[in-house]
Amino acid sequence: MDNSDLINISLLILFLILSAFFSASETAFIGLQRVRIIHLVKTRITGAQKVLDLSQDYERFLSTVLLGNNLVNTAVAALGTALVIKWMDNRNMSVLISTLAVTILLLLFSELLPKGFAARNSEKVAFFVVKPLHFVEIILFPFAKVLQYLMRILSAIGGESSTHRLVSEQEIRSLISLGKEEGVVDVEEANMLEKIFHFGDLRVSEIMTPRPELIWIEKDTTLSEFLKIYDKNPHTRFPVFHDSVDNVIGLLSVKDIVQALSRGRLKHADSITNLLRSVNFVPESKGIGRLFSELRTQGISLVMVVDEYGGIAGLITLKQLLEVIVGPVLEDGDPSEEPFVTVDEVTFLMDPAISVSDATDLLSTTFPDGNYQTLAGFILEQLGRIPEEGDHLDYQNLRLSITEMSGVKIKKVQAKIIAGVTGPSSS
């Protein structure tokens, strides 16, 4: 190995480093949150203005980075090929080996590693490379300007709009987070705004009242029979079925019953079937954002949810959709209770309507996937029957005991964290 080989190897390493520099710069600036950088400029963080200026002129930045990266990658390929050809007698094999070696070097050290690091640390990398990039811009300015011009011509030929999105969803979320941190936005207001973004990502199946928790009314039920059910389950509307709960024929509104009674058109022995309202159905896979818009437009407050086989999966109300954003909304007569009460370090009295996700956080356990959204739904699915007071279910490190029932509805559950239970088992 002579001096020329050492010089070529040194240049090869230098160009690999430069290639990594350009690749990391591209990824870092693509991953920047513009709102965050504007905030740093306002707080007079050194270098923030330069980062903002470069990120706002993305066409200029991209042409410089791409041009620089292609130049150094070409240099790496040329030097690598020259070195391998010089060291090997077989010219055909040397070309093949040099191609493979250069490809691996560029892929690993100039693409995967620098881009992976820059994606995880976009802000730090952007502040680190902004000054060197400015120097490269000056050197490559004439060539980068030609490349910019060509890019505009190709964009125009392809019919690409020159209108760019002013702000992304992630940037709005960052703005909300910054506002909350600085006290400009109230914590509750910030949480509500964040829930609005989450709203569009949810499906009906994630927030509906699942089938096992519904209170059903059978066709031809008399007023007397209904009042017994209502006494234990005072809801405002009930799904009515014929023969099977998968055959829902309408909804029964307590408002309609009261109105019929006040006008003397309904007696205790009369069937309530004539008071039924029509019912709408939606698939459980439907997005709740779209459903909310439809319910609001059509003036509907409750729909039945069907699964992929056409069976009833549950129901969902307009109120439930609103509660995703604003939290629980109590109606007149609703008890204002906490979802759980801590008895001691390992024992909790829980509202069975608590969501599975909240129960998971509280009890530090993981519930299996199933056709339920609440703790009551989990218990019903595991037991496979309507429980009685005193029944308990053992699952993982938990013992869930039914402490209070109201008819077929679970009213209170005691959750106790115990050792040695892997479950599920019941008694």
Image: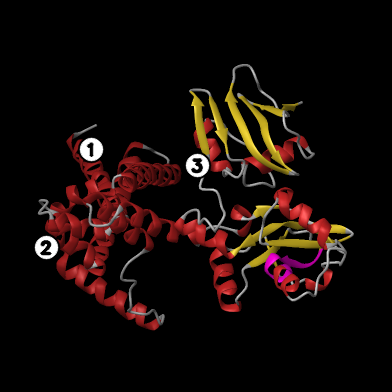
Q: Residue 89: image x %, image y %?
A: 39, 38
| Residue 205 visible | yes
Q: Main secondary structure of the magenta part?
A: strand
Question: 4 or 277, which lies in front?
Answer: 277
Q: Is residue 188 above or below residue 404?
A: below
Please identify the quarter of the rendering in which residue 243 is found: bottom right
Q: Which quarter of the picture shows residue 173?
A: bottom left
**For the residue labelled by badge 1, is the local secondary structure a helix, a strand or a loop?**
helix
- Which contiguous range is marked in magenta? 248-257
- Where does label 1 land, which residue? 5
Classed neighbour count for the residue bearing mark 2: other residues with Cα under 10 Å, few (<14), some (14–19), many (≥20)? few
Residue at 52 percent across and 30 percent down: it is 364
Q: Position of residue 352 (x, y in %)?
A: 62, 41
* Amino acid type at mark 1: Asp
Q: Name the front one of labels 2 and 3.
A: 3
Q: Is residue 256 covered in magenta?
A: yes
How packed is label 3: few (under 14 Cα within 10 Å), some, or many (20 or more)?
Answer: few
256 is higher (above) or lower (below) than 379: below
Q: How many angstroms separate mark 1 from mark 2 (CA)? A: 31 Å
Under mark 3, the amino acid is Glu
Query: Does the stretch in magenta take in 349?
Result: no
- Nearest-to-viewer mark from 1 and 2: 2
Q: Position of residue 57 (x, y in %)?
A: 22, 68
Quick one: quadrant of the C terminus?
Answer: top right
> Which image quadrant: the N terminus?
top left
Give the number of marks.
3
Q: For mark 2, what is the residue?
A: 138
Q: Earlier in the sequence, mark 2 or mark 3?
A: 2
Give the residue type at disc 2. Ile
